[in-house]
Image (spheres, rainbow, N blue to C red):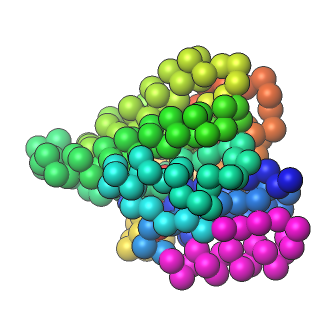
Amino acid sequence: MNKFVLVTGAAKRIGAAISHHLAAEGWSVLIHYNSSNEEALKLAAELKANNPEQEFPTIKCDLSNMQEVMHLFEKPVIKEMELTALINNASIFTPGNIEDITPDFLSQQMGVNFQAPLFLMQAFKKHSGNGNIINMLDTNVVKNMETHAAYLLAKKNLEALTQMAALAWAPSIRVNGISPGPVLPPPGEDQEHLKKVINNTPLKRQVGTTEIAQTVSFLLNNPSITGQIIFCDSGAHLK
Ligand SMILES: NC(=O)c1ccc[n+]([C@@H]2O[C@H](COP(=O)([O-])OP(=O)(O)OC[C@H]3O[C@@H](n4cnc5c(N)ncnc54)[C@H](OP(=O)(O)O)[C@@H]3O)[C@@H](O)[C@H]2O)c1
């Protein structure tokens, strides 16, 4: 039987890179998407062409809608699945300082970046009983970046939850986090935007999507690691 990993926000960018990497290592991937229907289907077709023995179903869910999130694991595609890993990768990165935060804005940022991962972790535990969870965090969780206050508050909460769940759910479920540095410019921004951030890292290096995917694979394959946050960020967290 195929072993499945659910990757949220898998249709594009880092999520797609993780999906390609894990598929090449023999995983079947449940490709979650919200607005990127076409890209999700294209990714599924590519993965199937390269790995005909494995399965690559897609599943849509708006992670800002907690009703949808709470019922995701009841969908037929997932109900009978042998799901052994969950990668909480989907995220929304919207600028705004502390003084810009409104109740609706906070709900949206906390919803997608913290509440949805939490409820998916819960559902995964209930559904699978054992396996692996990896939460995608951000190098800034150890800092106080002012420009994306609500986003960062959500990621800091997700970091704390990663360690809390790692302890609470051991020995059956391992829970780890990855904190990327500059990998890709935010959607809508160009490479120029990222240049300054890259030049400010100790290694002066853009983090490759493959390097993030390799870190995911490393965590999935190392049975002695739980509660760990790996900074794959060209050293950015040190400054
Ligand atoms: N890019 C970087 O350099 C960087 C740096 C630090 C941390 N990270 C973290 O690494 C992870 C991946 O980064 P990324 O840049 O590849 O992410 P991204 O492109 O900004 O977002 C990934 C996916 O999240 C999904 N998403 C957003 N809102 C959603 C909603 N309401 N419901 C369901 N899905 C939703 C989108 O899916 P659809 O397109 O299907 O709507 C999107 O394609 C994120 O957790 C991010 O915080 C990235």
Q: Report how many numbered discs are placed on residues in the image.
A: 0
Residue at image point 50% right, 21% down: 164
Point out residue 6 in the picture as x, y percentages from the top left corner: 63, 53
Residue at image point 32% right, 37% down: 153
Q: Does residue 52 sit above or below 167 in this rendering?
A: below
Residue 21 seen in the current view: no
Magenta region: which residues?
Answer: 37-57
Q: Does residue 200 sit above or below 119 in this rendering?
A: below
Residue 110 seen in the current view: yes
Please tell me which residue lies in front, 146 or 3. Answer: 3
Task: Identify the image quadrant of residue 29.
Answer: bottom right
- Relative placement, left or right, of 192 versus 151 is right
Q: Determine if the magenta segment contains residue 137.
A: no
Point out residue 170 in the picture as x, y percentages from the top left corner: 66, 19
Point out residue 46 in the picture as x, y percentages from the top left corner: 74, 78
- Relative placement, left or right, of 145 versus 33 is left
Please tell me which residue lies in front, 187 or 73. Answer: 73
Residue at image point 71% right, 67% down: 56
Residue at image point 41% right, 47% down: 70
Point out residue 134 in the picture as x, y percentages from the top left corner: 61, 40
Q: Does residue 131 sit above or below 21 in this rendering?
A: above
